Amino acid sequence: MSGLTFVRQFGEVALAIMIAPLFMGWIAQCRAWMQNRSAPPLFQPYRMLRKLFRKDAALAVNASALFRTTPYVFLGTMVLAAAIIPSLATDLPFARAADAIALIGLFATARVFLSLAAMDIGTAFGSMGARREMMIGFLAEPALLMVLFNAFLLYGSTALPSLVEGYATHSVIDPSVIFAAIAFLMVMLAENARIPIDNPATHLELTMIHEAMLLEYSARHLALVEWASSLKLFNYACIGFALFLPWGIATHGADGGQALLLAVAALAAKLIAAGAVLALIESLSAKLRLFRAPEYLAIAFLLAVLGLLVHLLLGANAHA
Amino acid sequence: MLKSHLIEQLLKLLAAGLLLISFAMLSRRRTQRLITLFAWQGAILFLSTCLVAYDAHLTELWFSAALTLVLKVIALPWILHILIQRLGAQWDTEPVVNIPVTMLVGLVLVIFAFGLAQPISMLATTITRNALGIALAVILLSFLMMITRRKAVTQVIGFLAMENGLFFAATSATYGMPMVIELGIALDVLVGVFILGIFFFQIREQFDSLDLHHLEALRED
């Protein structure tokens, strides 16, 4: 039994690592369709990674060990996060090691390392990008925590798997979930350098945040960072599914292949839908001025807090 | 019993949507978006009134739901659209207080409203008693919008949103007001919008702008 759960655990992590770039490619393709451009092939991110892995890495003369280890740390934290998030099954041995608050800590660790590495070289762009990233991060984190508190209150647990299982048994739509879902979507866009906050497709020095931090990376380091970034987006999407759309995830009691196959199919369907929705949002909205970003994230925070309040007032006798 | 439980859930969902729209109104800068949101608020009000009417088997409430649909979802937004197009006032300037601060104040108002409504809603026996706090919060948020905006059109929208909140409070606490009063209020609101529309043109003629701070000082000549 425990052997099977470990197999399931590693299968889930491997799947996450493998299909994260595909999710990025799918979003890029949807976006291209919506903007009437001819779309890049679905596997473009993999080709990009292959190209980067083949090249020789160039390092700045004053790059320290921190700069060189950061891509590995970034990818490592994201893989660990993928192990904790119940994207396919809730019966995961890793998931008991950390709850959702520790998960936010993992994301914060990755952010700190990336920002320090960007400042390490001492170029103007790197430190500018690092500062902006930290500003976005410190505004987005409380909003994300509030979203999670919302779910914790609803199901009385801080562990993601039991949240999913609680959802499966209650099956009542609480009004606070709407607020939390909108807030989570806003935080997800901000944290993953998507369009209202940052544009992943440009290197315009006035506006870039995430790309400015990666400017000094090349070859395999860049490939690792890009891969980790796509895994981060994938992880966020999976947290969103676990909190708000947990249908199809194989629960504790379900055993064996059939539930797992169903879970894979459900995950694929959700990812396809989520990619289309993300592309739609990015096509419809314009990038905000950097000084509007605090306002955007303040709104996300307020929505999450409102969700809590609504739950406390309206949801008091919801499960009677 | 099960059906009534489902209706209660749906009503809570709609009440939450109403609150969400009130906050969206606070965060918007463009007048045209505000009018669209106001129409959505009316639509939610219409749906919730229909649900209460269905659950309580009250024919009067069906009439007031129809009145809401005609007046608040179709007529008033349409009139306001025509007004702002004639006035060329699609844009709102910066509000008096910046938007994050306004939202924070709004959050405090919601907490205040919920705290205030808790003992009252204990006494009520209607299906929507929990929504009283939200109705109160919508009223206070509309007040806040009227206070923090400078332009005449947005203040009128705030006023109308406040009336929506009052209507919601009435349906949630006591299954609606008597029909005569409701008809009177509906007529008042309609006439009020017409009169305020005339005021808009007068204000613009006098001051070449719809900014209400021109009205604050007395003029010598």
Image (cartoon, rainbow, N blue to C red):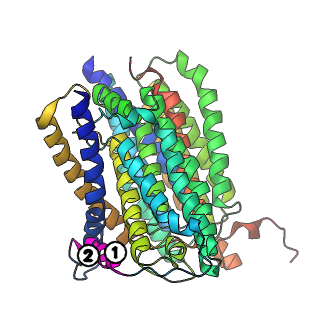
Residue A56, compared with residue B90, is above or below; it is: below
Rounded to the nearest angstrom, the CA distance separating label 2 from label 1 is: 10 Å
Q: Which residue is depicted at the point 38% across and 71% down?
A: A223
The residue indicated by pointer 1 is A53
Residue A125, compared with residue B174, is above or below; it is: below
Q: Is residue A48 magenta?
A: yes
Q: Upstream in the sequence, badge 2 or badge 1?
A: 2
Magenta stretch, overall SS: helix
Q: Position of residue B99 (x, y in %)?
A: 63, 59
Q: Which residue is depicted at the point 50% across and 48% down?
A: A106
- Residue in front for this viewpoint, B26 or A215: A215
Residue A241, compared with residue B82, is above or below; it is: above
Q: Quadrant of the N terminus of chain B?
A: top left
Q: Which portion, as a residue range, is magenta?
A: A42-55
Q: Chain of mark 2?
A: A
Q: Which mark is residue A47?
A: 2
Q: Which mark is residue A73?
A: none
Residue B174, compared with residue A130, is above or below; it is: above
Residue B71 shows in the view: no
Q: Secondary structure at mark 1?
A: helix
10 Å crowding of disc 1: few (<14), some (14-19), many (20+): some
Q: Secondary structure at mark 2?
A: helix
What amino acid is at disc 1? Phe
Residue A53 shows in the view: yes
Q: Position of residue B200 (x, y in %)?
A: 60, 68
Q: Quadrant of residue A112?
A: bottom right
